[in-house]
Image (cartoon, helix red, strand yellow):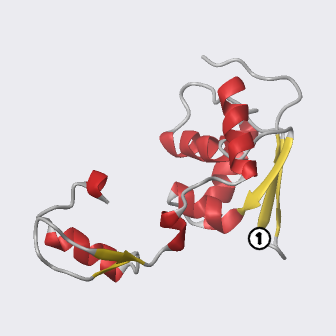
Amino acid sequence: MRGMWLCGRGELWEELEYANWLRRTTDRHPQVAVHLLDTAALSPQPDSRARARAAQWALHPAPLTVPAGLPPAVRLTALALASHTSGSTERGDMSALARLCGHSPQQTAELLDRLVASQTLAVWWHDWETDEIFWQLPSAPRTGH
């Protein structure tokens, strides 16, 4: 909490309380005592899949290479997919991907179509029952511009 530099910024403490991340037990500045409510904040250790994905990125940092000139929204969608790509066929949650990119699921579907049209993805499909999306990378990696 010290690293967040919240000292003297009461409105920021209030926001964290409102979001149920913590509860202040004292309200005196500069020292504030808090009780953390979000257990994930207590142990920010990534799971083994996240560590494996991070290692994959370290070895192969660009699983999806987007051609130059595509709009930022398409590039952001490719980046979000790349963060969840470690093999040739991957999957994720459409709602989560849309939230990550700041778009509606319909807009995200259009952006995924544009990634296929630019040959960044070979194909993608949406399982409407589970709201999962699947994507496949092209067989030959593209080179960036």
Q: Position of residue 2 (x, y in %)?
A: 27, 56
Instruction: Tell me which corner region of the image, top left, top right, bottom left or bottom right, holds residue 74.
Output: top right
Q: Quadrant of the C terminus?
A: top right
Near-viewer residue (80 or 40)? 40
Looking at the rendered structure, the secondary structure element under dot 1 is loop
Left or right of residue 145, residue 8 in this image: left
Left or right of residue 34, residue 81 in this image: right
> Which residue sits at x=52%, y=72%?
39
Q: Say whether residue 60 is visible.
A: no
Near-viewer residue (27 or 103)? 27
Residue kind at label 1, given as amino acid type:
Asp
Q: Position of residue 138 (x, y in %)?
A: 84, 32
Q: Say whether residue 29 is visible.
A: yes
Q: Which residue is mark 1?
A: 131
Left or right of residue 133, residue 102 in this image: left
Q: Position of residue 16 (x, y in %)?
A: 32, 73
Near-viewer residue (95 or 113)? 95
Q: Position of residue 135 (x, y in %)?
A: 81, 48
- Classify 16 as above or below 30: below
Near-viewer residue (5 or 53)? 5
> Which residue sits at x=57%, y=66%?
104
